[in-house]
Amino acid sequence: MEVDHDAAEPPYLQVAAILRERIRSGDLPPGARVPSISYLMQTYGIARNTARRAVGVLVDESLVEARQGWGTFVKRADGS
């Protein structure tokens, strides 16, 4: 999927939706590391803050968790 920079939906929500779908489809299984901010920036042509906001949406939805110094990971069904 690609980000449509001209769409009404902000790019960070589009990237969050792409990642959410990858989690739900099993492409990013529980315990998997979420792609890095740098990777998201390069892949989707977005700014650093936009990538951070996209991941932040998933953190707020409790789909992923950030671990200081380790990265961001998909949560397991038991919440860990």
Image: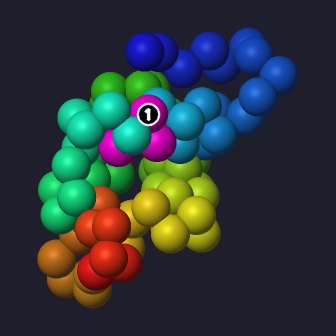
- Is residue 35 within the magenta segment? no
Residue 24, image x, y percentages = 39, 40
Magenta-tinted stretch: 19-23
As displayed, is residue 2 above or below residue 72?
A: above
- Along the line of sight, the residue nearer the viewer: 48 or 33: 33
The quadrant of the rendering that contains the C terminus is bottom left
Question: Residue at the location (29% across, 61% down)?
Answer: 74
Seen as rendered, the residue at the extreme front is 78
Residue receiving disc 1: 21
For the point 61% across and 42% down, which residue is it?
12
Location of residue 57 (image quadrant): bottom right
Residue that protrudes farthest toward the bottom in the picture: 68
Question: Where residue 3 sits in the image (x, y, percent)?
Answer: 54, 20
Q: Amino acid type of disc 1?
A: Glu
Q: Nearer the viewer, residue 37 or 27?
A: 27
Left or right, residue 78 beside residue 14: left
Label 1 SS: helix
- Residue 53 shows in this picture: yes
